[in-house]
Image (cartoon, rainbow, N blue to C red):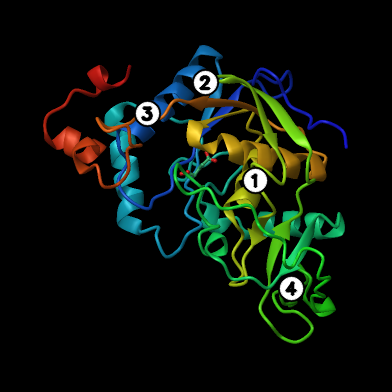
Amino acid sequence: MADPIVNPDGVDSGKGYRGRLAPSPTGRLHLGHAKTFWTAQQRARERGGTLILRNDDLDVQRCKPEFVEGVFEDLKWFGFEWEEGPDCGGPFGPYNQGERRGFYLDVFAKLLDADAIYACRCSRKDVLRALSAPHEGEEEPVYPGACRDAGIEARDSMLPGMVGGRRPLQDADGARINWRFRVPDGETVVFEDGGFGARRFVAGEDFGDFVVWRNDDLPAYHLAVVTDDHAMRITEVVRGQDLLTSTARQLLVYRTLGWEAPAHFHCPLVTDETGQRLAKRHDSLSLKSLREGGADPFSLRS
Ligand code: GLU
């Protein structure tokens, strides 16, 4: 197969530079998020670009309205300003993932037509957590492929996007099914990362077939993020280093869809004194605690 088409420098002659902040409102933001987002904002500003705020609230169980409010509060305090977003609108909305289901169904149908995905009956841990980006320590094991060649037939009448139709979430016997993207085993996915340089990941070794649609009828993270970054005309994705492997997965989805992929710029993770990535448990480094403790956002930015 051909190499993925990648926009090399993040500035597209037609679209200019379009970057995004894509927080998931599953808790309060901490300094690690803020530093990565700050890089995203700086890169957009230096290129005279547009910054989009997208609310990645796919995971309905974990995303709470109070966290959405908190995200806005924290971002504004830190000094973020965006030109498009859930609060101010813009030409490529809606900017809440929870309102973008139609886009995801269209892409699901395209992947189905391209024969790039297959029905899977497994209900493993990776299926359960497929709604969220796999951050450090959350990478799933390579899927052993029990359902890959099983040829599980989904019921015909349930293609997505059909008016009044059901989703293909059951096999011919009525068992619930997820949908997985079939990765080209042995192929090396190579990309030039703006922050880390050339990166290589081998499909089937560094990552395996991944879930794109869950049997509870929710799109998975990889499908949603590719769909939205494309639809929102994002030219460069800036995010944490722990999503480098996810970039390799997502480049395969872009290629299957025949879409140009954005450039990628991954940022080093902010760690605590023991070398662990900052997470919700580091309450003292949440932006809320820092603000309440009287910190000056200016001094936290670099
Ligand atoms: N909302 C996702 C997260 O918080 C976005 C990841 C991405 O940039 O693709 O991890």
Question: Where is the N terminus found, in terms of image quarters?
Answer: top right
Q: Which residue is mark 3?
A: 80
**Residue under pointer 2:** 44
Query: Could you tell me how far apart the alpha carbons at marks 2 and 4 are, in whole angstroms?
Result: 40 Å
Question: Judging from the image, what secondary structure is the residue with disc 3 in?
Answer: loop
Residue 207 picture location, percent across and down: 65, 46
For badge 2, the amino acid type reads: Ala
Vertical arrangement, residue 11 with respect to residue 167, above or below: above
Q: Nearer the viewer, mark 1 or mark 4?
A: 1
Query: If you read the primary sequence from the N terminus, does the residue marked by circle 4 or circle 3 appear first?
Result: 3
Q: Secondary structure at mark 2?
A: helix
For the residues labelled 2 and 3, the Cα–Cα distance comes to: 12 Å
Sort mark 2 into few (<14), some (14-19) or many (20+) by Cα contacts within 10 Å. Answer: many
Amino acid found under the numbered disc labelled 1: Phe
Judged by depth in the image, the label closer to the viewer, 2 or 4, is: 4
Residue shown at 29%/40% (left/top)? 73
Disc sitting over residue 207 in the figure: 1
Quadrant housing the C terminus = top left
Measured Cα–Cα span from mark 1 to mark 3 = 34 Å
